[in-house]
Image (tube, rainbow, N blue to C red):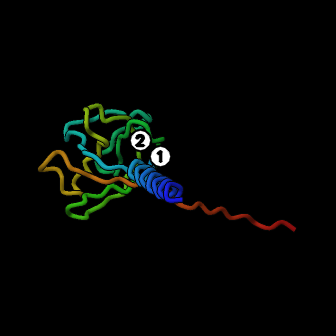
Amino acid sequence: MQFGSGLAAFAAVLIWAASDVALAQSPRQFTGVAAYYSTDYSGRTARGDRYDPTKFTAAHRSLPFGTRLRVTDPRSKRSVMVVVNDRGPFSKGRVLDLSLAAAKALNMTGRGLLNVTAVVEPAPATFTTTTATR
């Protein structure tokens, strides 16, 4: 009988550990190093937009264009909302490239690199109005 209860306990721990790993690697949240676009950069993003250093945008390797991210500096608790409109970063170990506006809002321009946590935010609700016809 003890073997059965031990096996059940082991299975419970295994399931708990697997769910914990799944949460840590959730596609809705990730952690890593972010950089920002050079102040000299001008050009087009992978989506075809002209890069605008005053907008809150970001580059990510695989998230769909238009994805909204809340990017937070865990040390200062500062956060910004950015929209993915480019591909990158192409430097090993980095998870995001941020626009100059986002970098300034996070106070990272003096450092260049920043450990961040990013959370995928739901798209804002869109409302449509219709007129009744008689």
Which disc is residue 93 wearing?
none
| Furthest-right residue in this view | 134
* Three-letter residue code for mark 2: Asn
Q: What kind of element bears circle 1?
A: loop
Residue type of the residue flagged with mark 1: Gly
Q: Secondary structure at mark 2?
A: strand
Where residue 22 appears, as percent x and y from the top left, is: 44, 50
For residue 66, the mark is 1
Tell me which numbered mark, 2 or 1, is placed earlier along the sequence.
Answer: 1
Give percent across and percent down for residue 56.
Answer: 34, 52
Depth check: give the residue in front, 92 or 127: 92
- Report the quarter where the C terminus lies: bottom right
Reply above or below: 3 against 62. Answer: below
* Residue 120 visible in the snapshot: no
Q: Quadrant of the N terminus?
A: bottom right
Front position in the image: 53 or 74: 74
Picture coordinates of residue 24 (x, y %)? Answer: 38, 51
Residue under numbered circle 2: 85
